[in-house]
Image (spheres, helix red, strand yellow):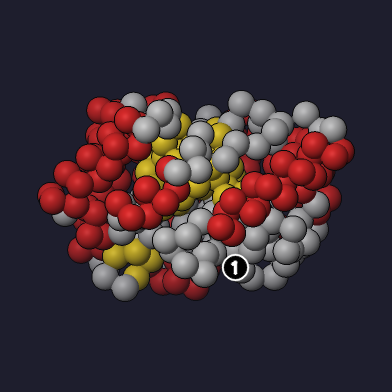
Amino acid sequence: MMPSLGLKASTSLEQIDERLQYQPSVFEFYTDAHDMTKNGLAHLEEMVKYVQSAGVRQIVIHHPMAYDHHHNEVAVSALKDPAGYQFMMSSADALIELAIKLNVQVLIHGGYSDKEAVVNSFGDFKTARKVIFARLDYFQKMGGDHVMFENSISPAFDYGDEEIEETVMAHHYRLCYDISHGFIVLHGDNDKLVNSIARLAPQTVHYHLVDSMGQHHDSLQLGKGKIDWQRVMKVVNPKATNIYEIDLADQNDSREMRASHEYLTNLLSTQQIH
């Protein structure tokens, strides 16, 4: 698979215009709680249409990562945190509805919190996972081919965990595989990472291409970490889209994402991997 130039931005017109000048074939919107207000959703819709008018056909909207200074967690207790639960569900519903209307994709993160926080919400980990999958089933039924689920470094929803992988395969979910998250979960083991990516490739429709040292969430530019990209790119789904989800020094300058694309394209061209 030769990667696409996939770039990510907020709903800021300045960021969007900076990305569009490089003619990406994939565009992912990073959203926050402000984008989920009535005015925010109207602005998001206009920005999606704006990106589409620039000729970009592959567009993903990332479900907000936070609400009221907490993770926007699928495994939120409706009883212990009714406001957080209401935000999580209503924002997912609104984005899926918008995605169907505009023929784009919504990405929902399967989890963010550590095991202790998830257990505190539901009493035990097994119950928490049941709740997560029941909610993902609901989103899948509602969104169909317009919704995908991303892996985390949280044990609530981490690819590399065989139990999670077996469940997502059994539920026939459409997946986003964040390569760095898988690498961190597997403690920097490239052999296990390649096996996990290959196993889930048939259901993976989108990749977050990000490097890592494999110890913690570091979101490195490709070539700056320890992921074996030659091996990874041999087993990804060639029909899937991708973006480079790299930490930027300046949110209005996508240079680290573009440098990652240049690195990977040169690497694969040199090795003649297709």
Q: Residue furthest right?
A: 271
Q: Looking at the picture, which amino acid does disc 1 mark? A: His
Q: Quadrant of the N terminus?
A: top right
Residue at position x 64%, y 47% in the image: 261
Rendered view: 95 above or below 110? above
> Which quarter of the picture shows residue 273?
top right
Where is residue 262? Give x, y as percent.
68, 47
Element under disc 1: loop
Residue at position x 45%, y 44% in the image: 21
Where is residue 126? Give x, y as percent.
51, 56
Q: Is residue 24 left or right of residue 181?
A: left
Q: Which residue is mark 1?
A: 217
Residue at position x 64%, y 54% in the image: 259
Rendered view: 20 above or below 69? above
Where is residue 85? Give x, y as percent.
26, 58
**Foreground of the two, 41 or 77:** 41
Residue at position x 37%, y 49% in the image: 16
* Number of numbered discs overlaid on the protein picture: 1
Where is residue 164? Give x, y as percent.
59, 47
**Foreground of the two, 58 or 265:** 265
Q: Residue furthest left?
A: 38
Residue 211 in sight: yes
> Which quarter of the picture shows residue 183?
bottom right
Q: Quadrant of the C terminus?
A: top right
Q: Is residue 2 left or right of residue 21?
A: right
Residue 130 in sight: no
Question: Callout 1: 10 Å neighbours few (<14), some, many (20+)?
Answer: some
